[in-house]
Each structure stands twice: as structure tokens, then as C-alpha cells.
């Protein structure tokens, strides 16, 4: 009887040990699977974020280039003349007294800016056109010295202040060189005349190209962008 009881006890112990071993292995397998799932999820998320970033950057670059190309295609080399020229266009009331001028290089185009004094408006009228001939100074009729192959003449109802007391005369730059600002098409911009309420700036360029003209306020500015 004691022998039978001993055999029965040994069998129960063996079954118990086998059950504990299977439980530990399953738990281990489950943990490993969970970790693998988390790693897979993290990798997928990182890859997606990288692709999204790459796509965004590429799209942004393409848009910038497309906008530049589109702008130049929509601009023109035709003359820009205000209504009623050479009298006032009526769009701005004046006075239009020049304060300073500058040029700058941009992707796809160069920019010339004429800024006016506080209390002034942009010119009350203008005539802007391309020419292969040198620009003629107002009043004297003498050809102005402007470097370049083609010339954008900017004649407007605006003053550099010569009719005002000397201390109020224009003190900004009268000559700007494209090489100093890294421009691609603008070679030089020169104030070539101020006569009887009309003033003229000449932009010498490497070649004739489409341009865009617009005005800004606070401060008042006349802006011309010229394609490369």
C-alpha cells in the first residue's frame, strides 16, 4: 500500500513540474511578440515621418521655383504708362519727394526700389519703357552715362527735391552698381535727371527682360522687378 502511494505521489509531482515549465515559456513568447510588434510600429512611424518631411521639402522647393517661372512668364517687356501721361494720373495725390533708392538680387529676378519721404505718395504719373539707346537727361538732352546693353527708362512726376531749400534736397544714392549686390541682370541704376517736376532714373541691364511694376505704402515706394 505504501509503495502504491509513493508511485502516485511521484506522478503528481511530475505533472506539476511540466505545467509550470509550459507557463513560463508561453509568457516569454508573448513578451517577445509584444516587443517585436512595438519595434515594428516604431519603425513604421519613423519611416512615415521621414517620407512626410521629404515630401514637404520637395513640394516647397518645387512651388518656389514654379512661382518664379510663372511670374516671369506673366510679366511683359511692354511700356508701362499711366493714364493721362504726361499729366497726373490722378491715382496718387503727391507730393512725391524721393528719399532713397536701392537694388537687390532675388531668385529669378532683380529688384529696384525707389522710396519716398514720409507724407509723400508714389509718383502721380510715369512712363517706363525699354530702349537699346542711351537714356537722355531731362532738360539738357544729353545722353546719360549708364552702364549696360539695354536700358529701362523710368520717367515720372516726382521730385528729388531740387526745387526745395538745399537742406531738403535728395541725399540718397544716385548710382547703384549691380555687382555690389549680386544682381544677375541689372548692371547699374542711375538718377539721370530732375527737371520741372519730372525726374528720371535709368536702369542699365545686361539684356531686355520682362518686368513687373507696383507700388507700396508706409513708406511709399515704387518697385520694379526685372527677370534674369
Image (cartoon, rainbow, N blue to C red):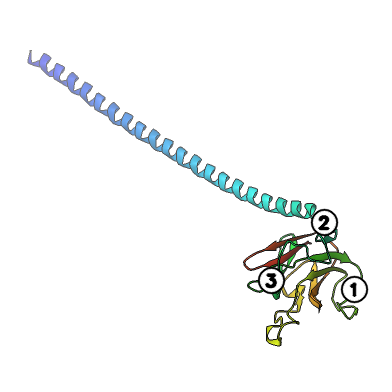
How far from the left and from the top, in percent, is residue 120? Answer: 67, 71
Which tag is nearer the camera, tag 3 or tag 2? 3
Q: How far apart are marks 1 and 3 (CA)?
A: 25 Å
> Does residue 17 sit above or below 97 in this rendering?
above
Residue underneath mark 2: 76
Residue 215 percent location from the top left of the image = 70, 62
Q: Position of residue 167 (x, y in %)?
A: 68, 86
Identify the secondary structure beneath mark 2: loop
- Quarter of the image where the C terminus is located: bottom right
Closer to the camera in the image, 161 or 2: 161
Q: In this view, does 59 lie to the left or right of 197?
A: left
Disc 3, SS? strand
- What element does badge 1 sit on? loop
Q: Compared to 57, does 17 lie above or below?
A: above
Q: Quadrant of residue 88?
A: bottom right
For label 1, the residue is: 134
The residues tagged by marks 2 and 1 sit, at their Cα atoms, a distance apart of: 21 Å
Relative to 181, does residue 210 appear above or below in the rendering?
A: above
Badge 3 density bin: few <14, some 14–19, many ≥20, Cα 10 Å: many
Of labels 3 and 2, earlier in sequence is 2
Q: Residue 107 carries which label?
A: none
Nearest the viewer among 73 and 24 is: 73
Q: Indicate which label's residue lies in the foreground, 1 or 3.
A: 3
For label 3, the residue is: 115
Amino acid at each position: 500500500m505504501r509503495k502504491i502511494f509513493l508511485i502516485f505521489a511521484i506522478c503528481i509531482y511530475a505533472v506539476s513540474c511540466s505545467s509550470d515549465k509550459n507557463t513560463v515559456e508561453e509568457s516569454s513568447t508573448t513578451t517577445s511578440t509584444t516587443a517585436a510588434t512595438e519595434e515594428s510600429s516604431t519603425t513604421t512611424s519613423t519611416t512615415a515621418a521621414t517620407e512626410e518631411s521629404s515630401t514637404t521639402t520637395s513640394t516647397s522647393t518645387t512651388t518656389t521655383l514654379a512661382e518664379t517661372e510663372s511670374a516671369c512668364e506673366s510679366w511683359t517687356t511692354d511700356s508701362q504708362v499711366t493714364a493721362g501721361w504726361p499729366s497726373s494720373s490722378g491715382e496718387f495725390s503727391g507730393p512725391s519727394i524721393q528719399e532713397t533708392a536701392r537694388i537687390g538680387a532675388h531668385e529669378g529676378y532683380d529688384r529696384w526700389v525707389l522710396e519716398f519721404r514720409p507724407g509723400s505718395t508714389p509718383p502721380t504719373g510715369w512712363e517706363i519703357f525699354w530702349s537699346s539707346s542711351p537714356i537722355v537727361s531731362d532738360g539738357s538732352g544729353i545722353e546719360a552715362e549708364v552702364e549696360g546693353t539695354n536700358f529701362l527708362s523710368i520717367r515720372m512726376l516726382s521730385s528729388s527735391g531740387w526745387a526745395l531749400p538745399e537742406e531738403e534736397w535728395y541725399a540718397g544714392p544716385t548710382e547703384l552698381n549691380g555687382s555690389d549686390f549680386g544682381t544677375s541682370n541689372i548692371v547699374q541704376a542711375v538718377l539721370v535727371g530732375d527737371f520741372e517736376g519730372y525726374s528720371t532714373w535709368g536702369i542699365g541691364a545686361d539684356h531686355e527682360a520682362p518686368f513687373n511694376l507696383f507700388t507700396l505704402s508706409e513708406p511709399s515706394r515704387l518697385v520694379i522687378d526685372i527677370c534674369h
